[in-house]
Image (tube, helix red, strand yellow):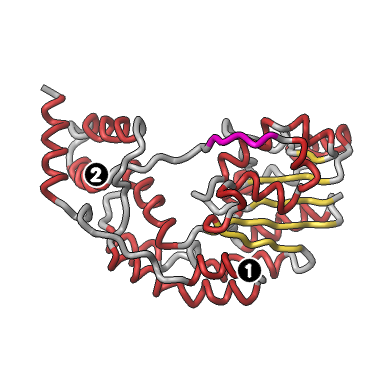
Amino acid sequence: MELILHIGQQKTGSTALQTFLNEKYAILRGRKILYPQSLGNEHNKQHLIMHSFKTQSLNEENGIKADFLAEISKTTPKKVIISDENMFVGKPENLNQLKVFVNDIFHKVKIICYLRVQHDQMPSNYQQGLKGKLSKDLRSWLDTHIYKSVYYKYHIVLNRWKNTFPEAKILVKTVGNLLHDDIVQDFVEAVIPEVKNEIIFESKTISNRSIDQPSGHLLYFLNKLIDKSKHPSPFQSIKESVISDSSNYTTKTPFAFSNEEKLEIWNQFKDSNTLIASDFKLSQADINYLTSPPEMKEDDQIDNLERVYLKFLEYLEKRK
């Protein structure tokens, strides 16, 4: 029995893939492929492997593991797919726990991950933080959180997996080189091609919509005000309105970093990305995606304080 581990990373289309695997459960079972329903799925059908380590429930014989083994016994699959984007940057001790869990059940392991080049991935994570409580400016966020974190040092992350699962086949792919620009079709072709002729691929994308550039700067400004004001803050409702409005449309000016910032980030991680290309046998298209300098675009939306100010006045007007 073969295990296919989809380990993310985040912001690469994992939700769309997990939704597809859940919706096609019956078709997959017909081909002896199991996408388990016993591993603590969330509403979006992502498996909760990393969460199970935190709660120490994965290896309990009367808990999740028992339910998982019962599901395998009932369905007798040839392949089992586990998908949890939080596995990507799992700590070494958690990967060792996963290894024990896996080796008890499977004789063959295949690991697949999709990478998004750092200067393109970071704006998504930064704006996600702004929707939360992040009140650090970009410079501080990069210096204190990102550059000191292992998350974006893809070569280190992937070698953790390689060292923990030396016998496993590791497929490293990128969102810049997807089959038909679709992670679902790319995944099917890569690891479960036996079902591709039985599935009509739908042209729907589950996307995390980007806030626009002024809204991003406004959220940073509001987080600063909320952080310094008494609770409940009068600015909280304005922030909620900004977030709500941004989720109702796909902006033509998505939140992005400046050309200078993108180039700095690219220089910070280009050596790590080059090592991936040589160590994990990437295609030339994937190599080009990870190692080429970022595309330079006009910076007319970056740090435009007048636009941010006008947007703030717009939300203040709504409160009257």
Q: Residue at x 77, y 63 (%)?
A: 168
- Amino acid at the residue labelled 2: Asn
Range shown magenta: 200-204
In this rendering, which labeled residue sits more in front, label 1 or label 2? Answer: 1
> Mark 1 or 2 closer to N-term?
2
Of 22 and 92, which appears nearest the observer? Answer: 22
Q: State the SS at label 2.
A: helix
Of 278 and 89, which appears nearest the observer? Answer: 278
Q: Residue at x 83, y 57 (%)?
A: 108
- Amino acid at the residue labelled 1: Leu
- Within-10-Å neighbours for mark 1: few <14, some 14–19, many 20+: some
* Tag 1 residue: 282
- Within-10-Å neighbours for mark 2: few <14, some 14–19, many 20+: many
Q: State the SS at label 1.
A: loop
Examine the rendering and report whether any part of residue 311 can be seen.
Answer: yes
Q: Is residue 162 above or below residue 247?
A: below
Q: Position of residue 259 (x, y in %)?
A: 29, 65
Quadrant for the C terminus, please. Answer: top left
Q: Position of residue 270 (x, y in %)?
A: 46, 74
Q: Which mark is residue 236?
A: none
Q: Which mark is residue 223?
A: 2
Examine the rendering and report whether any part of residue 227 can be seen.
Answer: no
Q: Position of residue 266 (x, y in %)?
A: 40, 70
Q: Residue at x 83, y 51 (%)?
A: 2
Q: Position of residue 154 (x, y in %)?
A: 54, 66
Q: CA distance from mark 1 to mark 2?
A: 41 Å
